[in-house]
Amino acid sequence: MDVIVMAGGMPGQKDALYAATQGGYKAMLEVACKPMIQWVLDALSKSPSVQRVAVVGLPPLTALDCEKPLVMLANTGEMVENVRAGAVELSRHNPDGGKVLILPADIPAVTAEMVEWLVAQIEASNHDLYGFVLNRKDVEALNCNEQRVFAHLKDAEVCLADAAGLMTSFANQVEHPLWKKMIEARKSPTRQAALLGYDVLFLLMLRQLKLKEAEAAINRRLGVDATAILCPYAELALDVDRPRDLEVLNDLLSKRAAVGGD
Protein backbone atom coordinates (compact mmCIF):
# COMPACT_ATOMS: atom_id res chain seq x y z
CA MET A 1 0.00 0.00 0.00
CA ASP A 2 1.14 3.54 -0.73
CA VAL A 3 1.37 6.10 2.06
CA ILE A 4 0.86 9.87 2.24
CA VAL A 5 2.84 11.69 4.93
CA MET A 6 1.36 15.09 5.72
CA ALA A 7 4.30 17.40 6.44
CA GLY A 8 2.98 20.90 5.83
CA GLY A 9 2.96 23.53 8.52
CA MET A 10 5.27 26.31 9.72
CA PRO A 11 4.27 27.53 13.21
CA GLY A 12 3.61 31.27 13.40
CA GLN A 13 4.88 33.60 16.10
CA LYS A 14 1.81 33.01 18.26
CA ASP A 15 2.11 29.23 18.01
CA ALA A 16 3.35 27.31 21.05
CA LEU A 17 6.07 25.65 18.94
CA TYR A 18 7.43 28.83 17.37
CA ALA A 19 10.32 29.08 19.82
CA ALA A 20 11.41 25.58 18.81
CA THR A 21 10.94 25.99 15.06
CA GLN A 22 11.83 29.71 14.66
CA GLY A 23 9.60 29.81 11.61
CA GLY A 24 10.90 26.56 10.14
CA TYR A 25 8.94 23.47 9.18
CA LYS A 26 7.31 21.67 12.08
CA ALA A 27 8.00 18.29 10.47
CA MET A 28 11.74 18.95 10.72
CA LEU A 29 11.74 19.54 14.48
CA GLU A 30 14.36 17.30 16.06
CA VAL A 31 13.10 14.58 18.39
CA ALA A 32 15.56 12.15 19.98
CA CYS A 33 18.37 13.23 17.64
CA LYS A 34 16.57 13.28 14.28
CA PRO A 35 13.74 15.15 12.54
CA MET A 36 10.40 13.79 13.68
CA ILE A 37 9.32 13.08 10.10
CA GLN A 38 12.38 10.85 9.78
CA TRP A 39 11.00 8.63 12.56
CA VAL A 40 7.83 8.21 10.50
CA LEU A 41 9.80 7.44 7.33
CA ASP A 42 11.94 4.92 9.23
CA ALA A 43 8.78 3.08 10.32
CA LEU A 44 7.52 3.06 6.74
CA SER A 45 10.90 1.84 5.47
CA LYS A 46 10.69 -1.18 7.79
CA SER A 47 7.09 -2.01 6.84
CA PRO A 48 6.89 -4.81 4.24
CA SER A 49 3.40 -3.72 3.13
CA VAL A 50 4.46 -0.18 2.17
CA GLN A 51 5.20 0.32 -1.53
CA ARG A 52 5.60 4.07 -2.16
CA VAL A 53 5.58 7.20 -0.01
CA ALA A 54 4.48 10.73 -0.86
CA VAL A 55 5.58 13.50 1.51
CA VAL A 56 3.36 16.53 1.06
CA GLY A 57 4.35 19.95 2.35
CA LEU A 58 8.16 20.08 2.38
CA PRO A 59 10.54 21.50 -0.27
CA PRO A 60 11.64 18.89 -2.86
CA LEU A 61 15.30 19.01 -1.81
CA THR A 62 14.68 18.37 1.89
CA ALA A 63 17.24 15.83 3.14
CA LEU A 64 15.24 12.76 4.14
CA ASP A 65 15.98 9.03 4.04
CA CYS A 66 13.44 6.43 2.94
CA GLU A 67 14.02 2.91 1.70
CA LYS A 68 10.79 3.01 -0.31
CA PRO A 69 10.32 5.07 -3.51
CA LEU A 70 9.72 8.62 -2.29
CA VAL A 71 8.06 11.59 -3.99
CA MET A 72 8.02 15.10 -2.51
CA LEU A 73 5.05 17.38 -3.19
CA ALA A 74 4.66 21.07 -2.44
CA ASN A 75 2.19 22.38 0.11
CA THR A 76 -1.05 23.52 -1.56
CA GLY A 77 -1.98 25.57 1.51
CA GLU A 78 -5.04 23.43 2.28
CA MET A 79 -4.92 20.18 4.27
CA VAL A 80 -7.71 18.49 2.32
CA GLU A 81 -6.12 19.49 -0.99
CA ASN A 82 -2.75 18.18 0.24
CA VAL A 83 -4.35 14.79 0.90
CA ARG A 84 -5.93 14.75 -2.53
CA ALA A 85 -2.69 15.83 -4.22
CA GLY A 86 -0.79 13.01 -2.53
CA ALA A 87 -3.44 10.42 -3.44
CA VAL A 88 -3.62 11.57 -7.06
CA GLU A 89 0.18 11.52 -7.45
CA LEU A 90 0.51 8.06 -5.92
CA SER A 91 -2.29 6.67 -8.09
CA ARG A 92 -0.48 8.06 -11.14
CA HIS A 93 2.57 5.96 -10.26
CA ASN A 94 0.52 2.98 -9.10
CA PRO A 95 -2.85 2.91 -10.92
CA ASP A 96 -3.74 -0.44 -9.34
CA GLY A 97 -3.00 0.72 -5.78
CA GLY A 98 -6.62 1.32 -4.84
CA LYS A 99 -6.10 2.66 -1.33
CA VAL A 100 -3.62 4.81 0.60
CA LEU A 101 -2.68 5.17 4.25
CA ILE A 102 -2.42 8.75 5.53
CA LEU A 103 -0.09 9.67 8.40
CA PRO A 104 1.01 13.05 9.76
CA ALA A 105 4.70 13.83 10.09
CA ASP A 106 4.38 14.68 13.79
CA ILE A 107 3.81 11.18 15.23
CA PRO A 108 7.42 10.01 15.69
CA ALA A 109 6.36 7.20 18.05
CA VAL A 110 4.80 5.26 15.16
CA THR A 111 6.47 1.91 14.43
CA ALA A 112 6.53 -0.57 11.57
CA GLU A 113 4.29 -2.88 13.60
CA MET A 114 1.65 -0.13 13.86
CA VAL A 115 1.90 0.64 10.15
CA GLU A 116 1.41 -3.03 9.28
CA TRP A 117 -1.68 -3.19 11.49
CA LEU A 118 -3.17 -0.05 9.94
CA VAL A 119 -2.56 -1.33 6.41
CA ALA A 120 -4.16 -4.70 7.26
CA GLN A 121 -7.29 -2.98 8.58
CA ILE A 122 -7.63 -0.84 5.46
CA GLU A 123 -7.10 -3.82 3.18
CA ALA A 124 -9.71 -5.89 5.04
CA SER A 125 -12.75 -3.97 3.75
CA ASN A 126 -13.83 -1.56 1.04
CA HIS A 127 -14.81 1.99 2.07
CA ASP A 128 -14.22 5.49 0.73
CA LEU A 129 -12.66 6.66 4.00
CA TYR A 130 -11.12 4.92 7.00
CA GLY A 131 -10.82 6.54 10.41
CA PHE A 132 -9.14 5.08 13.48
CA VAL A 133 -10.25 5.77 17.03
CA LEU A 134 -8.53 5.21 20.37
CA ASN A 135 -10.06 4.19 23.67
CA ARG A 136 -9.65 6.84 26.36
CA LYS A 137 -8.27 4.30 28.86
CA ASP A 138 -5.50 3.33 26.43
CA VAL A 139 -4.51 6.95 25.79
CA GLU A 140 -4.50 7.84 29.49
CA ALA A 141 -2.45 4.71 30.27
CA LEU A 142 0.48 6.32 28.43
CA ASN A 143 0.68 8.94 31.22
CA CYS A 144 1.76 11.56 28.68
CA ASN A 145 -0.69 14.30 29.64
CA GLU A 146 -2.05 14.15 26.11
CA GLN A 147 -4.77 16.73 25.45
CA ARG A 148 -7.52 15.14 23.40
CA VAL A 149 -11.21 15.72 22.81
CA PHE A 150 -13.10 12.50 23.50
CA ALA A 151 -16.50 11.52 22.12
CA HIS A 152 -18.65 10.05 24.86
CA LEU A 153 -20.37 7.12 23.19
CA LYS A 154 -22.73 4.63 24.75
CA ASP A 155 -20.13 1.84 24.61
CA ALA A 156 -16.85 3.76 24.87
CA GLU A 157 -15.05 7.08 25.15
CA VAL A 158 -12.90 7.54 22.09
CA CYS A 159 -10.77 10.09 20.26
CA LEU A 160 -9.42 10.13 16.74
CA ALA A 161 -6.02 8.59 16.09
CA ASP A 162 -3.57 10.44 13.85
CA ALA A 163 -3.98 8.03 10.96
CA ALA A 164 -6.53 7.51 8.22
CA GLY A 165 -7.14 5.61 5.02
CA LEU A 166 -8.56 6.67 1.68
CA MET A 167 -9.79 5.01 -1.49
CA THR A 168 -7.83 6.69 -4.28
CA SER A 169 -10.85 6.61 -6.59
CA PHE A 170 -12.71 8.69 -4.01
CA ALA A 171 -9.85 11.21 -3.92
CA ASN A 172 -10.25 11.64 -7.66
CA GLN A 173 -13.93 12.55 -7.32
CA VAL A 174 -13.20 16.28 -7.38
CA GLU A 175 -16.88 17.19 -7.56
CA HIS A 176 -17.93 15.05 -4.59
CA PRO A 177 -19.79 17.45 -2.26
CA LEU A 178 -17.89 16.22 0.80
CA TRP A 179 -14.60 17.78 -0.37
CA LYS A 180 -16.16 21.23 -0.67
CA LYS A 181 -17.93 20.86 2.68
CA MET A 182 -14.71 19.82 4.42
CA ILE A 183 -12.78 22.76 2.97
CA GLU A 184 -15.50 25.26 3.91
CA ALA A 185 -15.74 23.88 7.45
CA ARG A 186 -12.02 23.66 8.18
CA LYS A 187 -11.80 26.81 10.34
CA SER A 188 -15.38 27.14 11.55
CA PRO A 189 -16.67 25.13 14.55
CA THR A 190 -20.21 26.11 13.58
CA ARG A 191 -19.81 24.71 10.07
CA GLN A 192 -18.11 21.60 11.45
CA ALA A 193 -21.09 21.00 13.71
CA ALA A 194 -23.50 21.56 10.82
CA LEU A 195 -21.45 19.16 8.68
CA LEU A 196 -21.99 16.33 11.15
CA GLY A 197 -25.55 17.34 11.90
CA TYR A 198 -26.82 18.79 15.14
CA ASP A 199 -29.02 15.74 15.69
CA VAL A 200 -25.94 13.49 15.64
CA LEU A 201 -24.06 15.84 17.98
CA PHE A 202 -27.02 15.93 20.35
CA LEU A 203 -27.13 12.13 20.55
CA LEU A 204 -23.37 12.05 21.09
CA MET A 205 -23.66 14.51 23.97
CA LEU A 206 -26.38 12.35 25.52
CA ARG A 207 -24.17 9.27 25.05
CA GLN A 208 -26.96 7.56 23.13
CA LEU A 209 -24.87 6.30 20.21
CA LYS A 210 -22.58 3.30 20.01
CA LEU A 211 -19.47 3.55 17.82
CA LYS A 212 -21.03 1.79 14.81
CA GLU A 213 -24.27 3.76 15.23
CA ALA A 214 -22.32 7.01 15.22
CA GLU A 215 -20.46 5.85 12.12
CA ALA A 216 -23.74 5.06 10.31
CA ALA A 217 -25.32 8.39 11.32
CA ILE A 218 -22.34 10.40 10.11
CA ASN A 219 -22.21 8.46 6.86
CA ARG A 220 -25.86 9.27 6.20
CA ARG A 221 -25.22 12.93 6.95
CA LEU A 222 -22.13 13.23 4.76
CA GLY A 223 -23.25 10.95 1.95
CA VAL A 224 -20.05 8.94 2.13
CA ASP A 225 -19.02 5.37 2.88
CA ALA A 226 -16.64 5.70 5.83
CA THR A 227 -15.74 3.36 8.66
CA ALA A 228 -14.35 3.90 12.16
CA ILE A 229 -11.96 1.24 13.43
CA LEU A 230 -10.95 0.87 17.07
CA CYS A 231 -7.15 0.96 17.23
CA PRO A 232 -5.00 -0.58 20.02
CA TYR A 233 -2.01 1.74 19.53
CA ALA A 234 -2.43 4.79 21.75
CA GLU A 235 0.93 6.09 20.51
CA LEU A 236 -0.97 7.28 17.44
CA ALA A 237 -2.34 10.05 19.66
CA LEU A 238 1.13 11.34 20.50
CA ASP A 239 1.45 14.21 18.06
CA VAL A 240 3.54 17.33 18.62
CA ASP A 241 1.61 20.53 19.29
CA ARG A 242 3.36 21.89 22.42
CA PRO A 243 6.89 22.04 23.84
CA ARG A 244 5.71 19.53 26.45
CA ASP A 245 4.98 17.05 23.64
CA LEU A 246 8.59 17.30 22.49
CA GLU A 247 9.79 16.47 26.00
CA VAL A 248 7.47 13.46 26.26
CA LEU A 249 8.50 12.05 22.87
CA ASN A 250 12.20 12.69 23.43
CA ASP A 251 11.95 10.64 26.60
CA LEU A 252 9.83 7.88 25.04
CA LEU A 253 11.97 7.45 21.94
CA SER A 254 15.24 7.62 23.84
CA LYS A 255 14.04 4.85 26.15
CA ARG A 256 12.81 2.80 23.19
CA ALA A 257 16.19 3.16 21.45
CA ALA A 258 18.00 2.13 24.63
CA VAL A 259 16.19 -1.22 24.67
CA GLY A 260 16.59 -1.74 20.93
CA GLY A 261 13.02 -0.93 19.85
CA ASP A 262 11.97 0.44 16.44
Image (cartoon, rainbow, N blue to C red):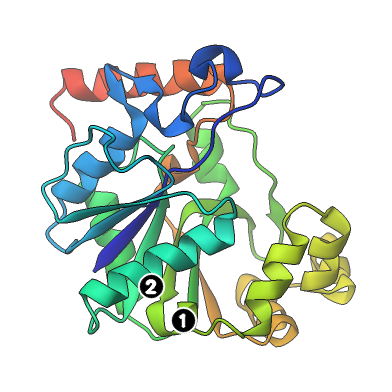
Q: Amino acid at mark 2?
A: Val
211 vs 259: above or below: below
- Residue 213: horizontal and vertical position, in percent? 67, 79
Q: Is residue 186 left or right of residue 7?
A: right
Dot 2 and dot 1 residues touching (CB under 8 Å) = yes
Q: Quadrant of residue 203?
A: bottom right
Above-or-below relation of 126 to 178: below
Nearest the camera: 141 or 32? 32
Question: How far from the left and from the top, in percent, is residue 232?
Answer: 41, 53
Crowding at dot 1, Cα within 10 Å, few <14 / some 14-19 / many 20+, comes out as: some
Image quarter (top left, top right, bottom left or bottom right) of the N terminus: bottom left
Quickly name the residue at label 1.
Answer: 172
Kind of residue at disc 1: Asn
Separation of residues labelled 2 and 1 (CA atoms): 7 Å
Does any portion of residue 246 appear in the rendered image? yes
Report the residue at 20% width, 61% height from top.
52
Q: Of all residues shown, which one is farthest toward the top? A: 19
Q: Considering only order in the chain, which callout, 1 or 2, is on the residue closer to the N terminus?
A: 2
In this view of the protein, which residue sits in the foreground, 132 or 190?
190
Q: Which residue occupies 36% across, 20% down?
A: 30
